[in-house]
Image (tube, helix red, strand yellow):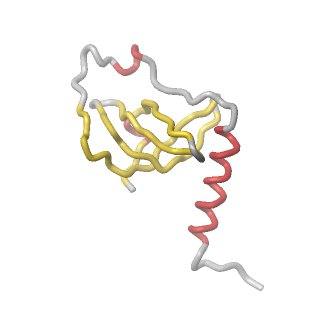
Amino acid sequence: MGTSKRYAHVVAQQINDRLVDVVARGAKLESLTDLELELDRLPITIDPLPKPVSAWVRFDRIPVRVDAEACRWTSTAVGIRFRVGETTHRCWVWRGAVEDR
């Protein structure tokens, strides 16, 4: 019996969601530092209607991809928020770590 190509993306998303849940449990979410963000030098845009994105984040140096919302950004970084279970996480990531959904 073969595999279902029709639902492969659904299975892949379920596996990724489970991985994020396991990795996030008890781990610290990493975010860019104030030095990296340069908020004293770079203008920041705050979006009243956050955009859906996919982003790479790190929990204790373990990279995982999450579905998130881009809430604010500079020319080099994006402030995102995302949920893992019942917990909402917020962090800054490099602009290259984010893709539109």
Q: Quadrant of the N terminus?
A: bottom right
96 w.r.t. 67: above or below:
above
Q: Foreground: 24 or 55?
A: 24
Picture coordinates of residue 64, whole percent (x, y): 59, 43
**Residue 6 drawn at (x, y percent):** 57, 79
**Residue positioned most to the front:** 86
Which residue is located at x 61 percent, y 33 percent? 59
Looking at the image, residue 48 sits to the left or right of residue 22; the answer is left
In the image, what residue occupies the spot 33% across and 39% down?
71
Count of residue discs: 0
Left/right placement of residue 83 relative to residue 41 reads: right
Q: Position of residue 83 (x, y in %)?
A: 52, 45
Q: Between 97 and 69, which is closer to the camera in this rendering?
A: 69
Taking the view exactly as shown, the residue that stands out farthest to the bottom is: 1
The single residue placed furthest to the right in the displayed view is: 1
- For residue 4, what is the image quadrant? bottom right
Query: Which quarter of the figure has residue 93?
Result: top left
Q: In which quadrant will I find the C terminus? A: bottom left
At a point 37% along the width and 51% down the height, the residue shown is 52
Q: Residue at x 54, y 27 (%)?
A: 30
Residues 62 and 48: in front is 48
In the image, 89: left or right of 21? left
Q: Residue 94 is drawn in which quadrant? A: top left
**Residue 21 location (% of width, % of height):** 65, 46
